[in-house]
Amino acid sequence: MSNMRKEDWQTTSSTTNAAESAHAKSKRAGTRLSLLAVISKGRRLDCEFLDSQKARINFGIASRYGNMSYSTRKKRAIRREQGRMTKSAQNRHIRSSQQDPMIEDEEEVEGGDNSE
């Protein structure tokens, strides 16, 4: 079991985009740097990230498009699950109607040929 608090877990991103972005940003800061330069540039990048998070929290200014708050992620997950359930129910109905010859016979009677 993890020692991470549930509140902390719920506020983390559901993707690895932040880590991948941080990696790309760190590469832009340079390679083959001295230890002191790496520490200094890492501190600067961390401060920039924290400043953007403070702006989002305090003023609602996001550094990127979209709302990825915990509540928004939950809403999207619920909608995806509802969509899967609906599609699954539709597929079951289609399969059962394809396997049930009585349904096909009833459709022929209802929309039958009036040429007689």
Image (tube, helix red, strand yellow):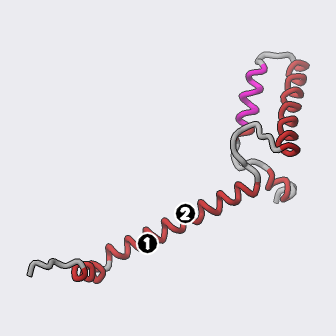
Residue at the left extreme, as displayed: 116
Q: Secondary structure at mark 1?
A: helix
Instruction: Name the quadrant of the N terminus.
Output: bottom right
Q: How far apart, in angstroms, are the residues tagged by discs 2 and 1?
A: 14 Å
Q: Position of residue 10 (x, y in %)?
A: 79, 55
Magenta stretch, residue numbers:
19-29
Q: Is residue 46 left or right of residue 115?
A: right
Camera-side residue of 111 and 13: 111
Of the residues shown, which amino acid type is indicated by label 2?
A: Gly
Which residue is tagged 2? 83
- Sequence-wise first label, 2 or 1: 2
Q: Main secondary structure of the magenta part?
A: helix
Which residue is tagged 1? 92
Q: Position of residue 98 (x, y in %)?
A: 32, 73
Query: Which class describes the residues within 10 Å of circle 2: few (<14), some (14-19), or many (20+)?
Result: few
Q: Residue at image x 70%, y 55%? A: 73
Q: Which of the 4 image quadrants contains residue 104?
A: bottom left
State yes or no: discs 2 and 1 in contact (Cβ < 8 Å).
Answer: no
Instruction: Name the quadrant of the C terminus.
Output: bottom left
Magenta stretch encompasses residue 26: yes
Q: Position of residue 101 (x, y in %)?
A: 27, 80
Query: Which class describes the residues within 10 Å of circle 1: few (<14), some (14-19), or many (20+)?
Result: few
